[in-house]
Image (tube, rainbow, N blue to C red):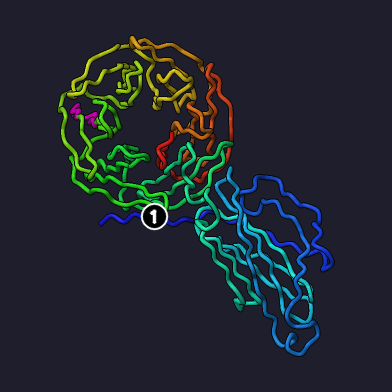
């Protein structure tokens, strides 16, 4: 049985500061850590006076018996550009003397806080999509806990994914992974976990129902298992269909062949040469549009846009021979050749991108052994031209196009599973590149795919 698990959990950051006094609610100096507000332990904190007295007078017998604490939380406000919310709470201790507490945020991080006798402490913390929670302990005893659903925090959280930017699904060889939101400046935030219990080597975004937002086709080439997964922004993944296909398809790509709502698929087996154009239905069912014999050995088959008619063409490439063909797709599944050319051998990435606003595809090609990277222009007659030819680092085994800045132009998420290094690359219209962010994702991800939950790519 397929189990999809989506646990909404974004790393939380919390800081506690002491109230400056009981006189007026004067604001103390603002303390800012280096880094960005959504990173754990790196949020802006302002110390404010909290003019709330404990219910027990300092020095009274009752206050001396055992410390207690109450925590009240104000309405949270939304950090729109970060997809997170900030919550402000006031912690009041009923204690005869200065009292040490431990505040635990929803990530499990522990923060020591001392509340002076007769005073209160104002705390601020940032949470992402999910539940806002904080616990207060005296020693090992939990004194209070506050929870709040981020859905209560305002309009931004209700439609958190309606942002015009892509999300990324990362997964490993076991079929276990996570979802991350990609922000304009290249940072990512964990949205939830993916556990399909399928050691999938193919995961592609598709449209099965003609409605906004992508679904995912998940396929295991060893067993032939093919699952169509829907993703609800609030409830996470759910299985639309779970079917048995033939094993051995090493290419499964979404295409548009007829102009009707919803995707079709091109599936191809590089060992046998069999190539099938498949119709996808809203219930996850499939039908065969055409079943043909192609040449053996194509290790790149990618959909592109050559002529602006909204129907897909294909770029196919054999990294051993260097042969590269641009293929026309017709509504009945037939194919025709735009061009048949000799490229260099050894490209292990050929990724369609958008470098300009003409609606036609360009290509990023990359050789992970040599580090050579070329941006290629595609023309309607099937010819190609070079935008730029550059030297990159070697060893990137994931190079995938994403949309992070809400423009029609592509960025690239590149990743090395050996080093764990991840770079979000800005692609310039003239063929240049720039770095949004160079960070560490962790080692071992097998692949990553960009998709869109709100359909506003």
Q: Report the residue at 51% width, 46% height from top.
A: 442
Q: Is residue 19 above or below residue 209?
A: below
Q: Is residue 295 above or below residue 232?
A: above
Of 164 and 420, the residue lying toward us: 164
Quadrant of the drawing holding the N terminus: bottom left
Q: Residue furthest bottom?
A: 61
Q: Is residue 449 at least partly visible in the picture?
A: no
Q: Say which quarter of the image contains residue 109.
A: bottom right
Which stretch did the figure color magenta? 267-276
Q: Report the residue at 54% width, 63% height from top.
A: 148
Q: Position of residue 342 (x, y in %)?
A: 34, 12
Q: Say which quarter of the image contains residue 90.
A: bottom right
Q: Position of residue 456 (x, y in %)?
A: 43, 36
Q: Is residue 247 at least partly visible in the picture?
A: yes
Q: Is residue 98 above or below residue 270?
A: below
Secondary structure under the numbered disc 1 in the rendered image: loop
Q: Report the residue at 20% width, 28% height from top.
A: 275
Q: Position of residue 434 (x, y in %)?
A: 58, 26
Left or right of 59? Residue 453 is left
Q: Position of residue 379 (x, y in %)?
A: 38, 12
Q: Is residue 320 above or below residue 386?
A: below
Residue identifier under label 1: 235
């Amino acid at each position: 049985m397929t189990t999809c698990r989506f646990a909404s959990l974004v790393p939380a950051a919390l800081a506690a500061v002491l109230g400056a006094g009981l006189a007026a609610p004067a604001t103390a100096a603002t303390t800012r850590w280096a880094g960005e507000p959504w990173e754990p332990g790196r949020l802006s904190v302002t110390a404010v006076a909290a003019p709330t007295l404990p219910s027990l007078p300092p020095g009274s017998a009752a206050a001396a018996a055992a410390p207690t604490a109450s925590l009240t939380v104000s309405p949270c406000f939304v950090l729109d550009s970060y997809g997170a919310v900030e919550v402000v709470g006031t912690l009041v201790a009923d204690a005869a003397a200065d009292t040490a507490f431990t505040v635990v945020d929803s990530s499990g991080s522990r923060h020591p806080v001392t509340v002076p006798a007769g005073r209160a402490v104002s705390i601020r913390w940032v949470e992402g999509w999910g539940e806002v929670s904080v616990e207060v302990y005296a020693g090992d005893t939990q004194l209070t806990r506050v929870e709040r659903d981020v859905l209560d925090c305002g309009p931004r959280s209700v439609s958190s994914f309606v942002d015009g930017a892509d999300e990324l699904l990362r997964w490993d060889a076991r079929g276990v992974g996570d979802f991350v939101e990609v922000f304009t400046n290249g940072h990512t935030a964990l949205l939830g976990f993916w556990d399909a219990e399928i050691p999938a080597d193919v995961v592609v975004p598709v449209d099965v129902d003609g409605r906004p937002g992508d679904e995912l086709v998940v396929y295991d080439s060893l067993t032939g298992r093919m699952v169509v997964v829907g993703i609800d922004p609030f409830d996470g993944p759910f299985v639309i269909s779970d079917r048995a296909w033939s094993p051995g398809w090493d290419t499964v790509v979404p295409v548009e062949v007829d102009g009707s709502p919803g995707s079709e698929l091109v599936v191809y087996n590089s060992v046998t040469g069999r190539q099938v154009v498949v119709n996808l239905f809203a219930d996850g069912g499939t039908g065969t549009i055409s079943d043909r014999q192609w040449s053996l050995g194509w290790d790149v088959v990618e959909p592109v846009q050559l002529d602006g008619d909204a129907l897909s063409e294909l770029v196919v490439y054999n990294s051993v021979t260097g042969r590269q063909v641009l293929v026309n797709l017709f509504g009945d599944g037939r194919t025709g050749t735009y061009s048949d050319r000799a490229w260099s051998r050894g490209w292990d990435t050929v990724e369609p991108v958008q470098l300009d606003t003409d609606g036609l595809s360009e290509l990023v090609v990359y050789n992970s052994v040599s580090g050579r990277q070329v941006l290629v222009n595609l023309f309607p007659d099937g010819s190609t031209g070079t935008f730029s030819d550059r030297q990159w680092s070697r060893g990137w085994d994931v190079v995938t196009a994403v949309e992070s800045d809400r423009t029609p132009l592509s960025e690239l998420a590149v990743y090395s599973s050996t080093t764990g290094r991840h770079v979000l690359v800005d692609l310039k219209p003239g063929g240049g590149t720039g770095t949004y962010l160079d960070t560490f994702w962790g080692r071992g991800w097998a692949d990553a795919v960009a998709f869109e939950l709100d359909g506003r790519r």
